[in-house]
Amino acid sequence: MADWASPEAVQEAVKAFRDMAYGQREYSISEQQARTTKESPGKGHQWVSRFTIPSTPELDILDLLLRAITHLDDGKGTYQRPSLQPLNAQWTGYRPGVDKDASEPQISEQQKYLALTDSARSPFVIYYVYGGAFYMNGPSTNRRIYTQLARLTGGRVFCVAQSLAPQFPFPATVLDILVGYLSLLHPPPGSYHQPIPAKSIVIAADSSGACLALSFLQTLLTIQRQGWASSGIRFHGHSVPLELPAGCAFVSAIADMTSSLPSYRLNAPNDVFPEYPPSILPGHPTCALWPSNPPRGNIYCELDMLTHPLVAPATAFNWSGAPPLWFACGQEQLVDSAKVVAQTAARQGVSVVFKEYELMPHCFHIFFPDSPQARKLWNEWSEAIVGISRCKGFENAALRVKCDGELSEENLGNLEQLLDLDISDVQDAMKRTAASYWVFSGQKKGWCPKL
């Protein structure tokens, strides 16, 4: 067990995990996707209720998303138009009074929902957007996270099964998140829940899920700012308002798809991943899914979309009007992209808290769950979610949690000046990197970053 108060021991633990994670290179995208999307029954303290959101016949939400994409980059990028499809969804709650190995009860999904609702101590809902590098994981993969948040906050947790890349590239998953949100506000036929007010919904996410959640939020802000839904949107036969959630709480948020900002190189020794994702390196196992057909240079999107604000939220100029935003990150490679979003939002009057855990890697609450840093994170994450649900804003702060045994905190300075970068600098850096990429063909001399 690592000595989590020792910087040297922490870095050694991170290195050991990174060496193990690099072994994923031997698996194809198809294999990784199949291994991480298997549905499993609820176990122990997990209440799980599954249902399907039917496809709405009206195209309003899709049209609004496409308008936002065009508006935010003047229609310059290339993408595949998604379609509205039925969407699998799950509710998760904390199930008290049972053994940790208890089986999922053999009752209807609606009865499970009623039981998890009865077990909830608070009326708010956590809408969780899970991560997985855009091509892995399903609703059951992170069920322990949902259950832990439900236990600590007393709320219910909702998530939708994401349309995964590479077969469903941007903006398919952003559309999924939008449809799931509308379904909370205005339940479609067959739903178990009653309408949930926007002020009672807190968005929580980690890793690439936080990128999707920021894209979702930027889409809502753009729609609201342009007045495109001022008279409501059609959804399952009704004209309904589209309101902002109470706020967002992110862990290890990703907001840059090109790894262009300084922290990517500076923090490499602290993070758990290889220098480049194995899936984009020459010689990675090919499969029916990857390379895509036609081939492209990024699993999630076309190369000319890598700097779009709905793909890389760090390039978004305008976060004004956003609800409170809470960020927690390790001293990780992509932390600068989250800092850019945090400082831009803070400059525009948004309530923001940003915490960086010294020497800790990406998603350390998952990779090192027994560390005192992870325990502190869980407590503060849940407290932030509860505070947001009670419509409490934050006193803006930027803090570093020290690796010193006491987990003492030091001020990082002015939240509005976290980095000596503005959005134009960020866009320029990302564009330079994106211009060096080319299409992954699966051949040994196919895709490779030009260093």
Image: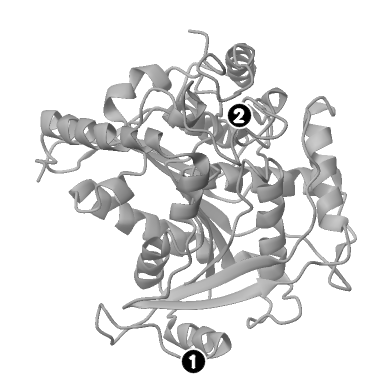
Give SS at disc 2. loop
Whether residue 311 is visible to the viewer of this picture, yes or no, is: yes
Indicate whether 72 appears above or below 262. below
Q: Residues within 10 Å of mark 1 (few under 14, many from 20)?
A: few
Q: Is residue 235 left or right of 107 when viewed as pictured?
A: right
Indicate whether 312 appears above or below 237. above
In the rendering, at what x and y percent does residue 319 appear?
A: 65, 38
Question: Mark 1 vs mark 2: which is more N-terminal?
Answer: 1
Whether residue 131 is visible to the viewer of this picture, yes or no, is: no
- Front position in the image: 90 or 255: 90
The circle drawn on residue 107 is 1
Which of the 4 image quadrants contains residue 154?
A: bottom left
- Front position in the image: 166 or 210: 166
Distance (Cα) linking label 1 and label 2: 43 Å
Residue closest to the far top:
451
Residue at 45% of width from left, 25% of height from top? 418
Give SS at disc 1. loop
Residue at 73% of width from left, 60% of height from top? 243
Q: Is residue 413 left or right of 137 when viewed as pictured?
A: left
Residue at 43% of width from left, 29% of height from top? 278
Query: CB under 8 Å between callouts 1 and 2?
Result: no
In the rendering, at what x and y percent does residue 131 appear?
A: 49, 48
Which of the 4 image quadrants contains residue 247?
A: bottom right
Which of the 4 image quadrants contains residue 149?
A: bottom left
Q: Residues within 10 Å of mark 2 (few under 14, many from 20)?
A: many
Residue at 55% of width from left, 36% of height from top? 346
What amino acid is at disc 1?
Ile
What amino acid is at disc 2?
Asn
In the rendering, at what x and y percent does residue 254 appear?
A: 50, 36
Residue pointed to by mark 2? 298
In the rendering, at what x and y percent does residue 137 appear?
A: 49, 53
